[in-house]
Image (tube, rainbow, N blue to C red):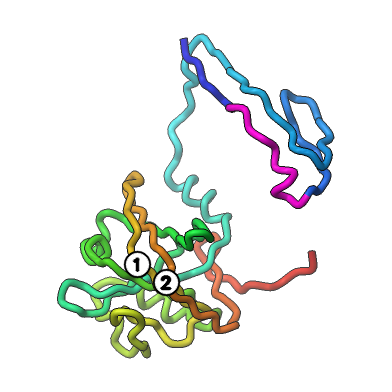
């Protein structure tokens, strides 16, 4: 018999949302919640046999994930010989404000994997809207990616690529295995915001960011 503990008792998110009034679904009932926390009691679902689901199609999974719009970054570091290394990544995300942490991931079979695994510092260069050529260059293999690229040394000499929308200079906090990727958690030590429109990526194509009225 398979027993899944679906939901431990948790407080609702009224306060985190600034006391806004809305609707929550609990056991197929719509519950109006007010400006005080709502407590969800523990709920256990018991089934007689494990749920069997069809295997995921990797191409369909990739297409599904591609519907999530991301920014585009180049993660830079120095290799064991002090030479600059960089790779295009959209697997970047904020993680924590206090302490200031970010996270990104890299394939285990990436050519530059050992450089990043051993580097104690790295920088997140958030690309601007006009930096598609930079993104393409650092996503290419078999070339000197920094050839013709204008950059300045940041903390401990880690490259900061010219013309980006923003920069986060980080020390490596920890790494964690995640399937065929390794997750890198960095502690942000210095930032620069250049007030340039960022480059976006969705469904396998570059995109522009257009602000909308809320």
Q: Which residue is mark 1?
A: 171
Residue 134 part of the magenta-drawn span: no
Q: Where is residue 41 drawn, in percent x and y?
A: 66, 23
Residue occupying the point 35% across, 46% down = 178
Q: Secondary structure at mark 1?
A: strand
- In this view, 213 is above or below 151: above
Q: Secondary structure at mark 2?
A: strand
Picture quadrant where residue 190 is located? bottom left
Residue occupying the point 51% across, 59% down = 98
| Left or right of residue 149, residue 166 in this image | right
Q: Which label number is shown at residue 189?
A: 2
| Chief SS of the magenta region | loop
Residue occupying the point 57% across, 56% down = 68
- Of 104 and 62, nearer the camera is 104
* Magenta span: 8-18
Residue 10 part of the magenta-drawn span: yes
């Amino acid at each position: 018999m398979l027993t899944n503990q679906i939901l431990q008792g948790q407080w609702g998110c009224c306060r985190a949302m600034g006391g806004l009034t809305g609707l929550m679904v609990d056991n197929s009932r719509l519950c109006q919640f007010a400006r005080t926390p709502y407590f969800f009691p523990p709920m256990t679902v018991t089934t007689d046999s494990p749920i069997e689901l069809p295997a995921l199609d990797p191409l369909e999974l990739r297409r599904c994930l591609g519907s999530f719009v991301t920014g585009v970054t180049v993660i830079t570091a120095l290799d064991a010989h002090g030479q600059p290394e960089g790779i295009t990544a959209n697997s970047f995300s904020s993680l924590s404000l206090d302490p200031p942490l970010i996270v990104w991931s890299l394939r285990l079979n990436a050519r530059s994997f050992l450089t990043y695994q051993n580097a104690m510092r790295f920088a997140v260069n958030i690309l601007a809207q006009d930096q598609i050529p930079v993104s393409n260059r650092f996503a290419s293999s078999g070339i000197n990616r920094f050839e013709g690229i204008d950059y300045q040394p940041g903390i401990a000499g880690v490259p900061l690529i010219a013309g980006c929308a923003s920069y986060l200079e980080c020390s490596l906090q920890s790494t964690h295995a995640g399937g065929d990727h390794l997750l890198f958690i960095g502690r942000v030590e210095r930032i620069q915001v250049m007030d340039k429109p960022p480059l976006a990526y969705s469904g396998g194509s570059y995109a522009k960011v257009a602000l909308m009225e809320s």
